[in-house]
């Protein structure tokens, strides 16, 4: 299952995000979306969990959790957003 995590504090690195989500299960892929021009985080990421159970646990534990100055918004990624991101 692929999650979309929004409202990520711009100071959070991909490795920090990976470590945060990995507490709730195995991760197949973690992609913090970066602005190509500035190299800065765009404040959202796609994370693929290896099991639906782990993904649901991550959603429950991380949604509305404050990380840095921001409160995360975590949910299952819609197929349309995954296709758009992978293009």
Image (tube, grey):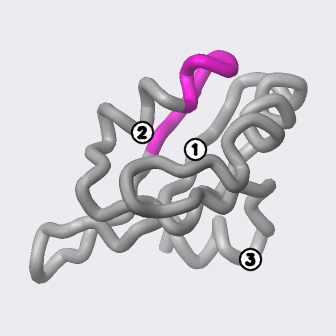
Coordinates of residue 30 in the picture (x, y in percent):
47, 40
The mark nearer the N terminus, 2 or 1, is: 2
Q: Earlier in the sequence, mark 3 or mark 1?
A: 1
Give the alpha-carbon distance from disc 3 to disc 1, as whole Å: 15 Å
Closer mark to the observer between disc 2 and disc 1: 2
Residue 60 shown in magenta? no
Q: Could you tell me which residue is drawn at 58 percent across and 78 percent down?
A: 84
Image quadrant where residue 74 sits: bottom right
Q: Residue at x 42, y 39 (%)?
A: 17
Query: Quick one: which residue is furthest to the bottom in this view?
Result: 37
Q: CA distance from mark 3 to mark 2?
A: 23 Å
Against 82, residue 47 (above or below) is: above
Which mark is on residue 80? 3
Q: Is residue 53 left or right of residue 77?
A: right
Could you say where residue 59 lies in the image, as x and y percent from the top left?
77, 43
**Can you say which quadrant of the picture contains the N terminus?**
top right
Tell me where residue 32 appears, x and y as whole percent.
Answer: 39, 54
Relative to 56, 71 lies left or right? left
- Is the Cβ of the residue at disc 2 closer than 8 Å to that at disc 1? yes
State whether residue 36 is above or below residue 14.
Answer: below
Residue that badge 2 annotates: 17
Disc 2: CA contacts within 10 A as few (<14), some (14-19) or many (>=20): some
In this image, 82 relative to 39: left or right? right
- Residue 46's x, y, as percent? 55, 53
Residue at 32% from the left image edge and 42% from the top image edge: 14
Q: Which residues are magenta?
A: 21-30
Kindly check if marks 3 and 1 are in contact, taking CB atoms under 8 A apart as contact: no
In the image, 77 versus 12, the foreground residue is 12
Which numbered dot is residue 47?
A: 1
């Amino acid at each position: 299952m692929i999650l979309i995590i929004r409202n990520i504090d711009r100071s959070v690195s991909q490795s920090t995000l990976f470590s945060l989500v990995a507490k709730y299960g195995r991760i197949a892929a973690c992609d913090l979306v970066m602005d190509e021009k500035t190299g800065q985080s765009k404040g959202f990421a796609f994370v693929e969990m290896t099991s639906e159970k782990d993904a649901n646990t991550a959603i429950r534990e991380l949604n509305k959790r404050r990380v840095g100055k921001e409160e995360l918004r975590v949910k299952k990624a819609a197929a349309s957003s995954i296709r758009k991101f992978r293009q």
